Every structure is written in structure tokens, then in C-alpha cells.
Image: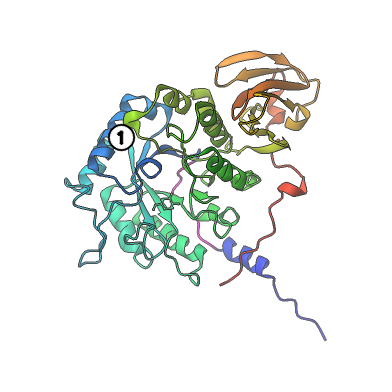
């Protein structure tokens, strides 16, 4: 008698995902950049904050640096839907009406983003969109929304996460308006395995906290996931804390350099009315941002680690590499500086290749090196360089930063049918 071979849950999952329709919005070919209200204001938002943020994004040069979305996070709506079932913006927070706010943001040359949730309520307990996807997607499209952040609170465990997010993806597609779809599902359901067809980015972690350890937790949860990112679909280790009080200046610099290298979406979450000059400099470092926005669209990753010393790298179009040399030694250590080395071998170059090393923060060439480059890196700081071989760059274009090492291999698909 022939034995029956039942497909494994993993095979069923793969087959199911292969049949899922795509997100056809053509957006986020490079990681999205902008401003989001949550990290600094939480739910305490209003129309003055949004309008002054829009003004400053233009005046400070942030929009020129690439930050072109202004996103209102949780807290914007009334507690109840209207009689017609439509979600309603808070009249006390937005006395001139949410359309006025959307129009104001657009009039500044910015794109306008809003927030909802793939459950019955948002995390602040306001109306979520589950079951009302069509109505809400149309509401957002009618307002001229260009970006939707979609959270994961108040969802029923039996309502599969892929279905919940795909329902809003489909509803957004049906409006005919290109709306960037930013999935905020905290890494739940291992989105890197399936969300390329659903969202333009997916959160890999719980919320960032305004602290060094909080930032590192988001980083560590994203390591090893670079292979799943591609143009239009990015890992999102959460929004930036640059400019907030919890990180020292060097910590903000390394946070930003790492997020750029990982090809994270870059969303500022500080009060722009009080932004320090140094935070603005970090956020507008054009050669660092250029790595994030590089047209090759391959995310960088951790390629070497020894204790608290880490090397991150990714390929750039034309055969160069972006490298972040990172020192995460405890602040109480006796030695403030560590030498951190990257070898050409680690980057897929022949050891004898002559290559220019450029410091992307200083915007200066450091020199021409063969075999390796070493920098002294301050505690909690990062040195970010671009390495460009003098000859035959093109042939180095297909190197990828995902190592063979088992420790960085993702586990096999574990999501099963609920
Ligand atoms: C969740 C998200 C945050 C933010 C809040 C809003 O915690 O992960 O980014 O949107 O909800 O309530």
C-alpha cells in the first residue's frame, strides 16, 4: 500500500503565501523617510504640533535631506465611529478638521501619513480597522493619505495575522491611490517570511525605548534578517530616537548609522521645535543617508562580532561597501576606545585590492588601503565608512552580507495555521 505524504505546515504556509496577491503600490523602492509623532508626543497630538512640524521639516532642510512623509500616529480619532460607521478625527485635537491638516502638510511639499490598527482597537483604545477595512481605506484615500502605519493591538488570536494585514493591503489597493503600507506588527508572525507581498515594511521588534539598551534590543532583533528585505519591502527596527533625551550624542550617531546600514525606514521621533544642532547634523548626514537610499537596495547586516565589538556591512551599487564599525562596550569600561577592523576578505574583495576608504560622517577620504581597515571607535560610537576598490568595481556587485554561519541562519518557517 502506498503511504500518504501530508504536506508539512511549513510547506502549506509557503504555498499559501505564493498565492497571496501582491501589494501593487510601486512605493518605497528605497526605505521610506519622514517624521512620526509617537516617540515624542505619544497620543498627545494636535493640529498645531502637526503644522509646526511640517513648517520645520521644510525650514530645517529635513525635507531636502529626504524626510518627506509626515505621519500622525495613534491618538488622532474620536473614541467612537460616526452613525454611518465612519471613523472620525478628534474635534478637540484638530478643530480645523483633519482635511485641513492633510492639505496643510501637502501644501508644504510633504506627503501625509496616518495610523490605524489590524484589530478592533488601536493600542490607545481608539477604533481599529478590522472588519472596516474598505470603509477606512476609502476614508484615508479621500483625505489624500499617502502612508498608512498599521498596528497590531486588540487582534483576536484566531484571526490570522496574514489575513488581517492582507485585508487592509487589498482595501488600500482597491482605492487606486498609492498608499505606502507600513506594517507595525512588532515581529509577530515572523513577517520577514511573508510580508514582502503585503506591506512596504514590517516591524521586526517591540517598540523602541528612549535608551541605549532599548535601541540595542531593536538592533539585535533585526540582525540576520537582511536577506528578507528588498526594494519595496523593508525590515523596520522601529523609529528613531535621535534628538530625544535618552541617548548621548555618540549613541545617537551609532543608532542612526546602524539604521541607515540596515536599510531601515528612517522616521524622526523628536520634538523638532527643540531639536539640537547636533541631532539635526546626525539626521541630515548626507553620505550616511546615501547608504540607506542606495539604489542597489540590499540591506546590510552584522558580518563579524567579538564580544562587544561588531562589524556591519552591506553592498552599494557599483561594487563599493558601506561598513559600520561599532563599539558597544559598557560605558563603565576602563578603555574608552577600541580598535575595530574590517578585512577585505570579509567584504568579498581580494586581499591585495587597493581600495579608497571614505569616512561618511567626516565626508573625507581617509586613504587607500589593502587587506583591511582599522579605526579607533569610541565607546557607544560608530565609525561609518565607504570602501571602494580602485579597479574593477562592477564585478563585486553581487556580494551579500548574509553569512553562512548557522548562528545567523533564521529558523525554518514556524508559522502554522490557526
Ligand atoms: C504600538 C506601536 C507604536 C505606536 C503605539 C501607538 O505600541 O508599536 O509604534 O504606534 O502602538 O499606540
Q: Measuring 63% from the left and 27% from the top, which residue is drawn there?
A: 318
- Give the residue at the far right of this rendering: 1
Magenta stretch prevailing secondary structure: loop
What is the quadrant of the C terminus in the image? Answer: bottom right
- Residue 197, given in percent of the width and then of the height, sits at 53, 55
| Residues rendered magenta in the picture | 20-28
Above or below for 333 versus 117: above
Q: Measuring 58% from the left and 53% from the top, which residue is drawn there?
A: 192
- Residue 29, given in percent of the width and then of the height, sits at 50, 40
Above or below for 187 versus 210: below
SS state under label 1 = helix
Q: Is residue 53 magenta?
A: no
Packing grade of label 1 (10 A; few <14, some 14-19, many >=20) is many
Above or below for 15 versus 259: below
- Residue 166, given in percent of the width and then of the height, sits at 47, 61
Q: How is the image coloured?
A: rainbow
Q: Quadrant of residue 396?
A: top right
Q: Which residue is mark 1?
A: 53
Count of marks, rendered view: 1
Q: Nearer the viewer, residue 217 or 258?
A: 217
User: Is the residue indicated by label 1 positioned so its CB lies within 8 Å of ligand 1?
Assistant: no
Can see residue 356?
A: yes
Q: Quadrant of residue 354?
A: top right
Q: Measuring 58% from the left and 62% from the top, which residue is drawn there?
A: 17
Q: Quadrant of residue 308?
A: top right
379 left or right, relative to 372: left
- Give the residue at the far bottom of this rendering: 1
102 left or right, relative to 335: left
What is the quadrant of the N terminus in the image? Answer: bottom right
286 left or right, relative to 85: right
Can see residue 400?
A: no
- Residue 395, given in percent of the width and then of the height, sits at 72, 29
Amino acid at each position: 500500500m502506498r503511504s500518504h505524504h501530508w504536506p508539512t505546515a511549513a510547506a502549506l504556509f509557503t504555498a499559501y503565501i505564493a498565492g497571496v496577491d501582491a501589494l501593487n503600490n510601486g512605493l518605497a523602492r528605497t526605505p521610506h523617510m519622514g517624521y512620526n509623532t509617537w516617540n515624542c508626543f505619544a497620543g498627545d497630538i494636535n493640529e498645531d504640533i502637526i503644522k509646526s512640524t511640517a513648517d520645520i521639516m521644510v525650514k530645517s532642510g529635513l525635507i531636502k535631506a529626504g524626510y518627506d512623509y509626515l505621519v500622525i500616529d495613534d491618538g488622532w480619532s474620536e473614541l467612537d465611529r460616526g452613525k454611518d460607521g465612519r471613523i472620525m478625527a478628534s474635534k478637540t485635537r484638530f478643530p480645523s478638521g483633519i482635511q485641513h491638516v492633510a492639505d496643510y502638510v501637502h501644501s508644504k511639499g510633504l506627503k501625509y501619513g496616518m495610523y490605524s490598527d489590524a484589530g478592533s482597537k488601536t493600542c490607545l483604545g481608539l477604533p481599529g480597522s478590522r472588519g472596516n477595512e474598505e470603509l477606512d481605506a476609502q476614508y484615508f484615500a479621500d483625505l489624500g493619505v499617502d502612508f498608512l502605519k498599521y498596528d497590531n493591538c486588540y487582534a483576536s488570536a484566531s484571526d490570522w495575522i496574514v489575513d488581517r494585514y492582507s485585508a487592509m493591503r487589498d482595501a488600500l489597493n482597491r482605492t487606486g491611490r498609492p498608499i505606502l503600507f507600513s506594517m507595525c506588527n512588532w515581529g509577530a508572525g515572523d513577517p520577514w517570511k511573508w510580508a514582502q507581498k503585503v506591506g512596504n515594511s514590517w516591524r521586526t521588534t517591540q517598540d523602541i525605548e528612549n535608551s541605549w539598551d532599548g535601541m540595542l534590543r531593536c538592533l539585535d532583533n533585526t540582525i540576520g534578517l537582511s536577506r528578507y528585505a528588498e526594494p519595496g519591502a523593508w525590515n523596520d527596527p522601529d523609529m528613531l530616537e535621535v534628538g530625544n533625551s535618552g541617548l548621548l550624542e555618540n549613541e545617537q550617531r551609532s543608532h542612526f548609522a546602524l539604521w541607515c546600514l540596515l536599510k531601515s525606514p528612517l522616521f524622526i521621533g523628536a520634538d523638532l521645535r527643540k531639536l539640537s544642532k547636533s541631532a539635526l547634523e546626525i539626521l541630515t548626514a548626507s553620505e550616511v543617508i546615501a547608504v540607506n537610499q542606495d539604489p542597489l537596495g540590499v540591506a546590510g547586516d552584522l558580518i563579524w562580532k567579538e564580544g562587544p565589538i561588531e562589524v556591519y556591512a552591506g553592498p552599494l551599487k557599483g561594487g563599493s561597501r558601506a561598513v559600520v564599525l561599532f563599539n558597544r562596550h559598557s560605558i563603565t569600561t576602563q578603555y574608552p576606545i577600541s580598535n575595530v577592523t574590517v578585512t577585505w576578505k570579509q567584504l568579498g574583495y581580494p586581499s591585495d585590492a587597493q581600495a579608497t576608504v571614505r569616512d561618511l560622517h567626516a565626508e573625507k577620504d581617509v586613504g587607500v588601503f589593502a587587506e583591511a581597515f582599522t579605526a579607533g571607535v569610541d565607546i557607544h560610537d560608530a565609525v561609518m565608512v565607504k570602501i571602494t576598490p580602485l579597479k574593477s568595481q562592477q564585478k563585486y556587485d553581487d556580494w551579500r552580507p548574509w553569512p553562512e554561519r548557522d548562528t545567523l541562519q533564521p529558523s525554518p518557517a514556524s508559522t502554522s495555521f490557526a
